[in-house]
Image (cartoon, rainbow, N blue to C red):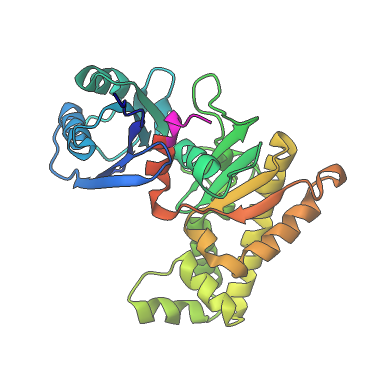
Amino acid sequence: MLHNTEQYVVGIDLGGTKIAAALFNSKGEILGRERMETANARTAKEVVQRMIEMIRSVARGLPLSGVGLASPGAVNSKDGIVLHGTNLPEWEQVPLKKWMGEALGVDVQVVNDANAAAWGEYVRGAGKGSENMVYVTFSTGIGAGIVLDGKLMLGSTSFAGELGHNIIQPDGPACSCGNRGCWEVFASGTAIRDAALAFMQSKSSAIAELAAACGEPVSAKHVFEAYKQADEVAVQVVDRAVHYMALGLANAVHTFNPDRIVVGGGVSKAGDQLFPALREQTEKLVMKPYRGTFEIVPAGLQDDVGLIGAAALFHQS
């Protein structure tokens, strides 16, 4: 008699406005997916109940070996509790591991979305084959996750790897976290946009025209488009951003000694407008023994990175 030894896992990516779920086989292939808006949910229990229903639906009766969940905000991964941090109702101290584990009868692992993305890139994406990897996403803010000696580094309260809030200029601009001069206020997509808007007050730029042509507010995307045209303001803004991005990456190199740095987020889509300069600047800023010991590569998993990383928490290497 043949036994089906295939291991099936459901990955969930929890956002403030939508929840995505997908069924994976042991090769990390997606066999089916579902998506749900959360707009009319009124309580945390209601959101969790919907997730349980989604998992049952996407699993199609197949036996699950686990459910991995990526959540924004602060997460206690050891106990599987989301402490706080999304637009969802009552989303404080939510014991996801307990509630969902009891309902489904499977092991549930919960991690912060940046950690899920880091682990996804390490197991299935641009970090594959590395031993020590730093993952950084430059978007609205800066998210990061660290894999050391092949293990996702969580820290004593699961908050490790918050690189965006390393202070690089103590008298710098105020950050949303309450401190001043965090890396995030200099090198995120938001910081690139804000710098462009500030420069454009005294100098005209193609950035404004490119944004207007798309009917969009100015963003980092338009800055990089204008940079391609050698627009003076865009060149200034990108050079400044690359300097600060490299500064934070150099700190990460000195702290973690990675062999690979994987860069994701909206800003990473700038490709050749960004990566050669970022590699060169980071190499200049690190101490001599570190030069040539790491590579900086764009992320590989795009929009499914949270789902893939959550499911990969059950990856058996």
Side of 33 where 254 appears, left or right? right
Please state the horizontal and vertical placement of residue 122, each as a whole percent of the image: 55, 41
- Rendered location of residue 232, percent (x, y): 62, 79
180, above or below 233, in the image: above
Q: Position of residue 231 (x, y in %)?
A: 59, 81
Residue 56 at x, y percent in the picture: 19, 33
- Does residue 256 lie above or below 198 as drawn? above
Q: Quadrant of residue 209?
A: bottom left
Q: Is residue 211 visible?
A: yes
Q: Nearer the viewer, residue 203 or 128?
A: 128
Residue at 75%, 60% in the rendered image: 280
Residue lying at the far right in this picture: please name it: 288
* Residue shown at the point (57%, 82%) measured from the top left: 229
Residue 237 showing in the rendered view: no
Q: For residue 112, what is the image quadrant?
A: top left
Asked if residue 17 lies in the magenta stretch, the reply is no
| Rendered view: 14 above or below 67 | below
User: On the rendered structure, is 90 left or right of 117?
Assistant: left
Q: Residue furthest front?
A: 1
Q: Nearer the viewer, residue 240 or 172?
A: 240
Q: Residue at left 28%, top 43%?
A: 16
Magenta stretch, residue numbers: 312-317
Residue shown at 56%/70% (left/top)? Answer: 199
The reply, left or right, for residue 101 in relation to residue 57 is right
Q: Image height check: is 199 above or below 266? A: below
Tell how many labels: 0
Magenta stretch holds residue 313: yes
State which quarter of the image contains the N terminus.
top left
Which image quarter: residue 128? top right
